[in-house]
Amino acid sequence: MIKINVGVQQLGIIQSVELYPYQKGTNILQQLFNKLNFNLDIRKNIQSTIKIDNVEVDINKTIEILEINNYSQVEVFLSKRIIIECDHEHLGSIKYNTDVFDQVNLFRIYLVKNFIKINSCEILIINQEDGTLFQNESWGKYGVYQNIKVSIQITKQQKIIFNQLIKEIKIDIFQPVAKFIHQFKFEQNIQDDIIIFKQQQKQINPDSIYMNLNLSQEQPWEAEIQKDFIFQIQFEQNNKQITVSQNIEVFDLIGIMRQQFKIENTIPLKLEYKLKKKILDIDNTIKQECVPTCSQLILIKEPSDNKINILLLNQKTHIKQFERVAINSILGDLDVLINYDKNTESIQYYVGEQMKDKKQNLQQLNLKSECVIKYLIENKQKVEQFEKQKIVQIQLVREPSDENSQIKVIFENMYTKQSKQIMISSTCFINDGLQQVLQNEIIKDTSYYQVYFDQQKLNLQARFNQFNIISNSKLSYFTEFVIFSAFVQGEDLELIVDQNLSILQIEQQFKKYHKINQQLFLKIEKLQDKNLSLKQLLQKHKNFQFVFQVSSDIIIQENQINLCIFLNEINSQIQLQMQNDERGLDICQKIKYNYKLPKNQIIQLYIGERLVNYNETVSQIKNEISIKNQQLRAQFIYFLNLQFVSSCGLVQKIVKAQLEDTMQQTLNNNQINGDNFICKQQLLDINQKIKELPIENNSIIKYQSNQIILNFQNDQTGEQHKILTYQDESFETIINNLGVRINQLKYQNQVLDLTSKIKSINYNPNENIRFNEQPNYHEPSDVIQQPQQVKVTVTIGDKNLTYCVSHNMLLSQLKKDVHSKMKKNPDTLSKYALKYQGQFIDDQRPLSSFGKANLEFQYSLLYPIVHS
């Protein structure tokens, strides 16, 4: 036997193989492919040549004829053509023909030459399927041997002169300049100042995409501070430039635009930030809406609704409240918009500095849209006696109505299950009802609560009749806020906080609110516990007492380690101070806190190309970095893998949910239909973004599905059948689709109307629907017939298993046999499942429930291996 070294220069590797003289050159390739774990498909499609001492040889000749010995220089050259596809929002569809053994960098050169035209840029290439970041090695080095789709991120370093110093920011060339302004302000800690960018004294349009700028790529930009906002306002066919104060509110800007364009008083107006196609919130300032100066805004008008915008200003607290009210309302109608105690307090209104009679009409007062109405809340004892005794009928302000019916509403605390019944007018605001209920709660401010009716989140400023809430309706309410109490130098202080925030965040809020000395810190025995949420900490330590102490009094663990981490997302390094016994997960939590990332954001840590396990200690990570002389990298992942399971267990689907998408978008994108989506016994608001929901990677989300399994039983033979269908289907449709001949259907001893829908009978899955066969003297009966033998094909990767089994076999039996034939560990059976038509299915179903003689299933992991 001859032992030789075989080099594959394209992969930068040398493999040792052993051969007999009578074996052929093809055996060299076979052993090499085995060592490289090439599957059958790759071997079939790859082109291979062998060179011995730099001379190409016939691979079909024997080792002896080729005169190969232990000292021969054997090299293998491989080739396989693939197409790299990229669908880019700005560059369009890109198809790049290459060899799997070509360097990835050639693709970057191709992009710069043919599409980007910017030389000094960095191009990140990411495998869309698994998120792999390609560096400079060949495609094959990353296991890519088939056509793939990639996404690309293209950035460059832009120099900016500010305060006579040159700064650098990393920018995405496909983003607008406005984003770079926000990024620059954040990195330079510029809070309130208005910033513009210039190049050679020419202002750069913030709405323009960097790639479309006709500017010198190497010339630095200049950053300047401006005193006022300048906007280009577009209204229909007209355009105007306007200069306004840097503290202006959207409400006031709309009022100015109404005057500038001479728009009628009762026409609703909205301002849209053209770049982001975003309607500006009338409650916010322009700064809060993050609109850069010199941006273009679009003024949008809607049909008149006979209402005007008003600003209600509390003269004592200076609290502002923006409302849209009917022009024919009287001042007294505004009472329902203001939070006050109706039993002991009354409201007086002022226009300018003059108090007005509450009976006066807004139109009679000549009040224009975007006007200010001031008010004072006073004790009723200070008001004249006839005012106290007057019966005020509340009129609808936004849509006046005569409806004044009293309804009985039950409010139930979702967590404590305590309920309270109240009587209230259906025209009242939900907030008014909630106020009555909260008298027995510790936190009485309604702004901390959420209210649901039939799994729909309610707007507290809406009226009961807007949601068809009738008498005896049940509303659920809850809050995630608690009263946080801590001792500070002998004094017990309190603050209402969100219990889902980390202890570190609550500590900062508490110090800021109570203006606590910055040298004081919460005493926590383990520093890593500060990354826990308040809820998590109290689950570990139920009666924990929070105390602020001077930092020198706090127990600080020894052996702290400074970690240098490279963040791929922003192409820069950060320093973190960690404890020896903290783990990889703690590193990720600190990164999330420092960069204000969502709680459920996935961060993957790498040392070189090795993925770090979250349970590895900081000490272990630091040692490996030192030994390998490699950098610790953090990669942000912008999606979660979620498993959706229907209430009946029939539909199981694993999807990728983008953090920026709402749950509703995720459901639509993956064709999931249902109601009441619940994770860990908590009802999810499908209108919230994935990043805002209390879910994490690999969460199981259960929901009520419209699908159901019906059990049918033949009264004559006793034979039972299971049928999968939808609750909106009629019994007639099911029978017609199956070709069933029956006399009648019975459920719970009652004959069913065949035109009725399944959901009308409140079906119990533990009971049977009975039927009588309709005799046919010419043909054999077809009563819900199922094939006695079913041919089943199960696909596992590139292998197939074929069975011919009884139609009564359960999927769990089939799954167990497949698991055994694949020689898998019996303990891992629960981690695998069968898929039918791309969806996981309940393994308690019999094959007969599919109603087919030929079935195809896929066998795969129930939970894909995704590191969170």
Image (cartoon, grey):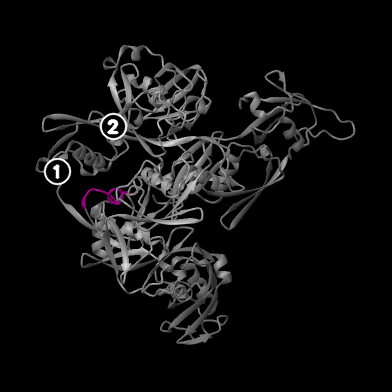
What residue sits right under mark 1 in the picture? Answer: 518
- 842 horizontally vs 51: left or right: right
Q: Note whether 867 is above or below 432 in the view shown.
A: below
User: Extreme left residue here?
Assistant: 552
Residue 100 percent across, percent down from the top left: 50, 72
Mark 2 is on which residue type?
Glu
Q: For the residues labelled 2 and 1, say whether their Cβ atoms are less than 8 Å apart.
A: no
Residue drawn 41% across the image and 41% down it: 695
Residue 631 lies in the magenta stretch? no
Of labels 2 and 1, earlier in sequence is: 2
Q: Note whether 729 is above or below 416 in the view shown.
A: below
Q: Residues within 10 Å of mark 1 (few under 14, many from 20)?
A: few
Q: Which mark is residue 391?
A: none
Q: Note whether 321 is above or below 426 in the view shown.
A: below
Residue 448 percent across, percent down from the top left: 34, 31
Mark 1 is on which residue type?
Gln
- Residue 280 seen in the current view: no
Cα distance in 3D space between marks 2 and 1: 43 Å
The answer to which of 198 and 229 lies nearer the viewer is: 229
- Residue 542 seen in the current view: yes
Residue 583 lies in the magenta stretch? yes
What residue sits right under mark 2 in the picture? Answer: 353
- 82 horizontally vs 565: left or right: right
SS under mark 2: loop
Residue 570 percent across, percent down from the top left: 33, 60
For the magenta stretch, what is the residue range?
A: 577-596
Q: Which of labels 2 and 1 is toward the front?
A: 2
The answer to which of 474 and 737 lies nearer the viewer is: 474
